[in-house]
Amino acid sequence: MRPRLVFVHGVGGPRDAAAELAGWTAALASGMRAAGHSDVADGLSDGEVDRRFVHYADLFRPAQAQGSGAGDEADEATAGILLQLLDEMLAGLAGALPQTPRSEHEEQAARILAHARVQTAPRAQEQGTMAGARRALNAATTVLSTRMFRGLGQWTAPKLMVRDLGQVARYLARRETDASGLTLDARVRDRVAPELGPATTVLVTHSLGTVVSWETLHERPARTGLLVTLGSPLGMRTVVWPRLVPRPQRTPEKVDAWLNFFDHDDPVAVRQRLEDDFGPNSAMVGPVSRRVDSTGFWVHPARLYLEQPAVAGPIAEALRAAAATAEER
């Protein structure tokens, strides 16, 4: 049986799953070669590994198209989560700036981020979903109109930033039921679960995908040799961590090892040491957090993480060990 490598993406618009699989694989292979595992890197493209890319972005079509469950109450709850998420991410961006000494350019960036955070704060005279959405859009506009943050990440326009961060909020709101009564978050997990099973050697997850995968592994336990989380918001104390299901928050029962990678300048991975927030499973397996460092200001993309030898090396070792075990059988 070939080792299975499963990728789970984060936020963003519609994707070409085949192209994403190829791109993530190429980035990982580059990291493996840099880590001295060229044989495993070659095996990724030679069919020696069963590679799969879980795609769920299409489920995040406009909320009003989801069904009768996306009413005003659901929208207002989602808007509140979005504002909290945006504020925590802006705080992460501010934390990535040099503290002292700062250039005039960096001081200006710090002031702009502080102003944007003020824009996310609730106001007593404002009520309703549209008020929250306006505040989120205003804050995103403030940030992206600044030269330092223009084109931040994949966001070329404020509406795209709000749309993508809104996916996290909509998932955590656990509303938007379809005709069968399934909520949006359940439908997303239904995309991940079928790709997992006894053959899963490594599960590589990024951003929102780390939340989806963690909950899926609790809901439908599947033996996973190595869980890898990249740029994870799992530890976001004001937004994500308190809303995770199940509680108390711990390592999924059938995960044999969990490596969590963070870049110190990644504003999404604001709580970097997940071992401080997640207990071990019954086998005493807990998250092990490791820092990596990429160049540039926006270091959140999955491919930047996968190109890191420190990330790709353990994945290569897990795949090699699984292949060797299969041969012995």
Image: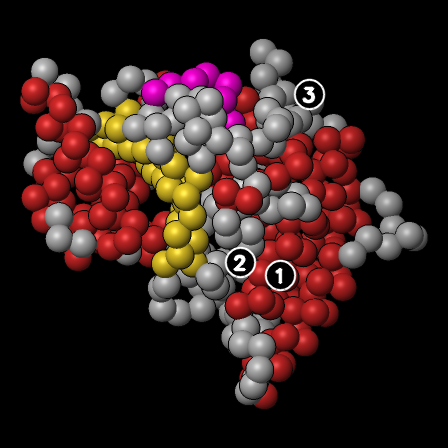
5 to 139, vertically: above or below: above
Q: Are marks 2 and 1 in contact (CB under 8 Å)?
A: yes
Within the magenta stretch, is there residue 134? no
- Mark 3–mark 1 distance (CA, rounded to whole Å): 33 Å
Q: Secondary structure under badge 2? A: loop
Instruction: Indicate the quadrant where residue 10 lies.
Output: top left
**Three-letter code for the amino acid on which mark 1 is drawn:** Leu
x then y, percent, for residue 303: 32, 52
Residue identified by numbered label 3: 68
Q: Quadrant of the C terminus?
A: top left
Residue identified by numbered label 1: 90
Q: Quadrant of the N terminus?
A: top left
**Three-letter code for the amino acid on which mark 2 is drawn:** Pro
Q: Is residue 44 left or right of residue 247?
A: left
Could you say which disc has been placed on residue 302 in the image?
none
Could you say which disc has been placed on residue 267 in the image?
2
| Number of marks in the rendered image | 3
**Three-letter code for the amino acid on which mark 3 is drawn:** Ser
Q: How is the image coloured?
A: secondary structure
Specify which label sits upstream in the sequence, 3 or 2: 3
- Mark 2–mark 1 distance (CA, rounded to whole Å): 7 Å
Specify which label sits upstream in the sequence, 2 or 1: 1
Q: Along the line of sight, which residue is nearer the eye, 294 or 134?
A: 294
